[in-house]
Amino acid sequence: MSTKTQWIDDELHSLKEQGLYNTVRTLDSPQGAWLVVDGRKALNFCSNNYLGLANHPRLAQAANDAIAKYGIGPAAVRTIAGTMSLHVELERRLAAFKGVPSAISFQSGFTANLATIPALVGKDDVIFSDELNHASIIDGSRLAGAKIVRYAHCDANNLREVIANERKIGFRRALIITDGVFSMDGDVAPLPEIYAVARENDYLLMVDDAHGEGVLGRGGRGIVDHFDLHGQVDVEIGTLSKAFGVVGGCVAGNEKIVEWLRQRGRPFLFSSAMTVPDVAACLAALDLLEASTELVDRLWENARYFKAEMKRLGFDTGLSTTPITPIILGEAPLAQQFSRRLFDEGVFAMAIGFPTVPKGKARIRVMISAAHARDDLDRGLEAFAKVGKELSVIR
Ligand code: PMP
């Protein structure tokens, strides 16, 4: 009998034993404050649907109208089969929204990072990377082949120190990369301080604004707007899958870098573009974001309320200053048990453990949305209070 995949059985068994095995629940409803999860109605505390756009009628209508006009697929990569005017329009609108000269779209935020980092640095170069940067930044950095030097989380002084060390060794170019909002803790990078280090050294600076777009800044224009750093950050990575409610990625920056990505960004050159309904829905999302700050305001109101109430109940919400609300529990099996009990109580909130977060820092991550009504949040708080007491997390 062949034993060549026995190691997979062993690894899966070990994941289950450590409480680290991912079980993916099945949804039978559109995104929104409430979902049908594994056949049961449940309050949704999991999605990155910050503004409730994932099932917004205006986006759905725009997608349908575009399908009627352009069909669905782009049918090949853009350099080979041409690019639809819709994609060009999306890139123009994204650049205007972000307040940058130019933007380019990708299939996802993940591929935007995979495209950008290897296009900017290579084997003789150094990437200075926050130690808690997202997996797609880590993978993009590995793909680039540059030396990866991690600096302490959100610590511009440590960034200075590691740069000084590397300068003694020597390198060709350098790129500093940070997440804008850190997705597991909900804290915000000290971008002005990091920018000061980039400027002192004349290094390229890149920020991944996946959780800042539609959330931070005026009307959701993102972290660069939030800190009023327009024109200072060389590359902003974005995703269209979170606040925008669709799927896709984006790189916003100066014309030269965007032009270079059209020449050398491998997912642009070797993978097909976003689909027609996705692009049209993103354009409708931009219309909504540019017309009013109502959804962004509601998101923040909900986030502030929920976090304050969770703290009052005695939960540890970590470092979060954004709608991402981690409930730090410690060991992975406790977090999994907490999540299962919440589900029994009609609340869908997933446990997150190693390797997504460090060992001993397992948590439930609650994602607040403008789609939640105050009653929904109160329902969730009740369930957290009940399960928290039952499992002796709070008194
Ligand atoms: N960057 C960060 C910081 C993210 O949190 C995510 C999504 N988890 C991504 C990139 C990838 O975005 P997408 O889902 O569009 O691939």
Image (cartoon, rainbow, N blue to C red):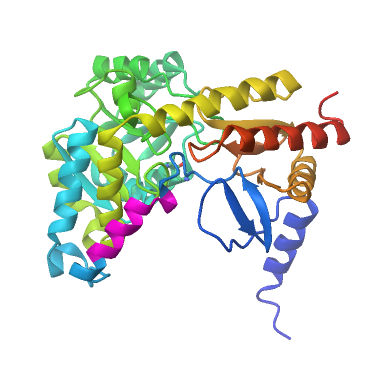
Decide whether residue 177 is among the magenta residues.
no
Q: Residue at x 48, y 26 (%)?
A: 300
- Name the image quarter holding residue 161: top left
Q: Nearer the viewer, residue 163 or 253?
A: 253
Q: Residue at x 19, y 47 (%)?
A: 91
Specify whether 351 is left or right of 104.
right
Query: Quick one: which residue is furthest to the bottom in this view?
Result: 1
Image coords of residue 36 (percent x, y):
62, 58
Q: Can residue 150 be seen at all in this image of the molecule?
A: no
* Magenta extent: 54-66
Q: Residue at x 68, y 37 (%)?
A: 380
Image coords of residue 209 (percent x, y):
37, 35
Q: Can residue 120 be seen at all in this image of the molecule?
A: yes
Q: Quadrant of the C terminus?
A: top right
Q: Nearer the viewer, residue 381 or 158?
A: 381
Q: Quadrant of the N terminus?
A: bottom right
Number of numbered tags placed on the structure image: 0
Rendered-image quarter of ligand 1? top left
Q: Is residue 388 above or below residue 260?
A: above
Image coords of residue 363 (percent x, y):
68, 37
